[in-house]
Image: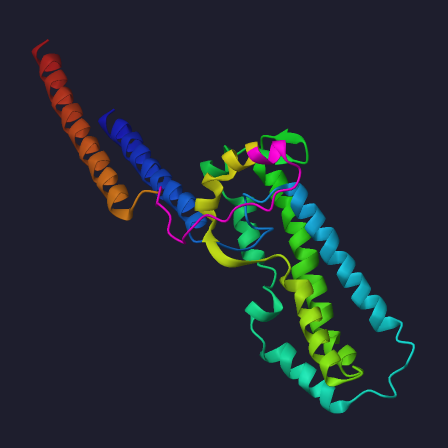
Amino acid sequence: MMDYFLYHKLIGATDSKQELIGATDSTQELNDLVVVNRYQLPTSSFTTLVFLFVCQMTLSLFYIYSLNNNKKGWADSSGWRWFIGLLLCNLAGEDEIGYVFQFAFWLKLLHTKDPRMQKVPSMMFFFKIQDFKKEVRARMFMSMFVNMFTRRIILCTAPILLSVANDPIDFVKDCLAVFFINKLDDLHDHVRFVKALKQKKPMDKENSSCCLHSGNVPEGNDYEEVSESEEDVEEKIEKLEKRVKEDAEKIKAFDTRLQRLEEGA
């Protein structure tokens, strides 16, 4: 009887330990996320993001159309301009050509069990939804089209288009225009996702009264940690183990007393 009871006590203590560690991991995974574009920024209005996506895709289609319908042909293309365009596309950093699609960022948002993500309502156009993850999926697909597919097409074909620039000043303007398409959604100041998520609810109230809203970027990059530290978890585990030992001693004393009563009977 005592062994059976102790077994279940110890199993319960182990499960509690795993639950505490799992809760810490689930809250810790969002704390490391950094927002670099408006598709990732929770305070950005979904309506604004849709219009931003339409603008970027339209500019991208104009670029592809110009590339495929060059009436002058490629006879006057310059190998030197092509080489300089190739160097620009390979040597320029993400601050100049825009940030690449961050697949790990979106996977963490979609698969997280953090309660902060579960309790955040959202506004999609004029409709209020209770699950922010539905909006996250739409944001992810828009960011994927712009920052992965379109970005790769432009970077791979930009040297070809730049090689047929008429004069040097047109070459410079074309370089700036090509990189502008991918940078249109980037943020100048990066921010922690958790801090921006805290401001989403009051921002949604403002967005509901105004269709277009770019979303305010929280000031500073610091944020308050809301998850428990490893020391707090270990302290809880120690208290739980101590309680299990005390219960085991009480059970042992009770069994001893019960045996004495049986022997006396």
Residue 258 position within the rendered picture, expressed as x and y whole percent measured from the top left:
14, 16
Q: Residue at x 88, y 88 (%)?
A: 75
- Please say whether residue 105 is visible from this viewpoint: yes
Q: Is residue 190 above or below residue 237?
A: below
Vertical order, 253 against 91 (above or below): above
Q: Is residue 218 inside the magenta stretch? A: yes
| Residue 224, quarter of the rendered image | top left
Where are the magenta residues, as a range? 206-226
Q: Which image quarter holds the N terminus?
A: top left
**Is residue 33 positioned above or below 264 on the image?**
below
Task: Report x, y in % for residue 171.
Answer: 73, 80
For residue 102, side relative to residue 66 (left or right): left
Answer yes or no: is residue 33 visible. Answer: no
Could you tell me residue 149's position as x and y percent? 71, 62
Q: Quadrant of residue 137?
A: top right
**Measured from the top left, where is residue 56 in percent x and y?**
72, 57
Q: Nearer the viewer, residue 105 or 52?
A: 52
Q: Residue at x 56, y 45 (%)?
A: 215
Quadrant where the C terminus is found in the figure:
top left
Looking at the image, the residue that sits furthest to the front is: 169
Q: Is residue 50 left or right of residue 101?
A: right
Q: Residue at x 75, y 57 (%)?
A: 57
Examine the residues drawn in magenta and state their main secondary structure: loop
Q: Nearer the viewer, residue 137 or 218?
A: 218
Query: Quarter-wise, where is residue 144 in the image?
Result: bottom right
Q: Is residue 22 above or below residue 37?
A: above
Tell me what residue is drawn at x 58 percent, y 79 percent. Answer: 91
User: Is 25 on the left-hand or right-hand side of 54?
Assistant: left
Residue closest to the far right = 71
